[in-house]
Image: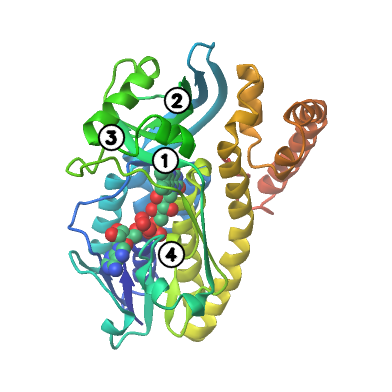
Amino acid sequence: MKVACVGAGPASLYLAILLKRNDPQNEVTIFEQNRSGVADGWGVVFWDDLVRELHENDPETAAAIVDQSYRWVDQLLDIAGQPKVRVRSTGFSIRRHSLLNILVARAVELGVKVQFEREIVDSRELHDVDLIVAADGAGSRLRRLHADRYKTTISIGRNKYVWLGATKVFDSFNFGFAKTKAGWIWFHAYGCDGETSTFIVECSPETWSGLGFDTLGMQDSLSLLEKIFTQQLSGGRLISRSSEASSLPWLNFRTVRNQTWYAHNVVLVGDAAHTTHFSIGSGTRLAMQDAMALASHLRNSADVAIGLEAYQRDRRHALSLPQREAYFSARWFENVDRYIGFEAAHFFALMQSRRSPWLARMPPLVYHRLSKATSAPRKLLRQVRRSKTLLQYYRGEETHVGGREYP
Ligand SMILES: Cc1cc2nc3c(=O)[nH]c(=O)nc-3n(C[C@H](O)[C@H](O)[C@H](O)COP(=O)(O)OP(=O)(O)OC[C@H]3O[C@@H](n4cnc5c(N)ncnc54)[C@H](O)[C@@H]3O)c2cc1C
């Protein structure tokens, strides 16, 4: 099979690796508009459920990713001026730069051709291939050219966010909140190697313009954020990847959905097919799972069209829950004022429930009391379920046990 992949993000690179592992005769070429070694964004989090799946699909890649990942412990809520709240949790994070380097090296080792600095503006440029993979991210050009075929919808989040790095290494997953004269502003931060952390700042558009971020230049914006979060950053600095730009790259999150995931021989994977708000930390995992599903359906189907249909059915179904949870999680952060008046431990408990559709529909205090009242029986039920699964596992009836979900 001859495959052309547009974009060298996690979805495309992992798919190329798996296609070559399935059959070394597969010819796979990746076209990436950026230079080699350039990666947008900072670090991403993931959990051991992804590690297990990576290991099942390609142990070499899994080992390299774990080796270059940072292991953070616990989640921490840090509201300026209040005692910190900590809950037990553990996960991984990795710089996107490191992740992409690992994937490129493995793909090349298996015989994939990767052409950097090659932008594809139309799928018609890619002749003589059996399959074109549109892995060109949330703003996918290939998808936009035929949005009617895919029945694409894009909804724009209300809040402003910016994806930065920090020189302080946060050894826990931190949610830090600060009150300013223009309203609340907060960050999601976690170490992503031994030297830096991911630091995503988010706030309402009113707070954003009230603090002047709509007019401030790059350095002034970074200095203001460092001042606002000075306590949580312990004097550390903030870093923007777009250091040559005149202002910080603030964005509104775009949720992408498609009713159809392929048209003729062009298939959407990763962010081109779907996005999930960053507050559930799942986009990279879902992109790599798309790759696993597509490679597997192509291997097991009589022809490409049957494989694409099976892939679409499988992944559209798999995405419905994370996209729903991401929707409620994003809305939770758009309504922080509804929850911020609670004392820190309650506030954190409500934040942990942010994916729930019920929380948005009932008074937070009622939700909190109800969920506390039902948490003991739920815990018991979970334990019973878990011990049952463990029993099945040891009897060989289950291939894997549980998976840590975020948070
Ligand atoms: C603030 C933020 C935080 C996040 N944190 C997490 C997290 O903690 N955990 C997690 O799992 N996910 C996280 N994500 C999501 C994650 O970054 C994406 O879901 C993931 O990168 C999607 O991978 P992809 O391969 O589909 O696309 P991308 O990684 O976007 O790659 C697309 C590639 O295509 C290239 N390209 C685009 N157009 C063209 C063209 N015309 N020709 C050639 N090349 C092209 C681009 O240069 C890019 O390299 C976060 C996202 C954001 C915005």
Q: Amino acid at mark 2?
A: Ser
The image quarter containing residue 402 is top right
Q: Amino acid at mark 4?
A: Ala
Can residue 95 be seen at all in this image of the molecule? yes
The foreground one among 98 and 55 is 98
Real-space Cα distance between discs 1 and 3?
15 Å
Q: Upstream in the sequence, badge 1 or badge 3?
A: 1
Q: CA distance from mark 2 to mark 3?
A: 31 Å
Of callouts 1 and 2, the N-terminal one: 1
Work out whether 139 lies above or below 134.
above
Category of crowding for the residue at label 1, using alpha-carbon neighbours closer than 10 angstroms: few (below 14), some (14–19), many (at least 20): many
For marks 3 and 4, give the CA distance: 32 Å
Please name the residue that numbered disc 3 is placed on.
216
Under circle 2, the secondary element is loop
Cα distance in 3D space between marks 4 and 2: 31 Å
Q: Are marks 1 and 2 in contact (CB under 8 Å)?
A: no
Q: Which residue is mark 1?
A: 161
Q: Which mark is residue 272?
A: 4
> Which type of secondary structure does the marked residue at label 4 adopt?
helix
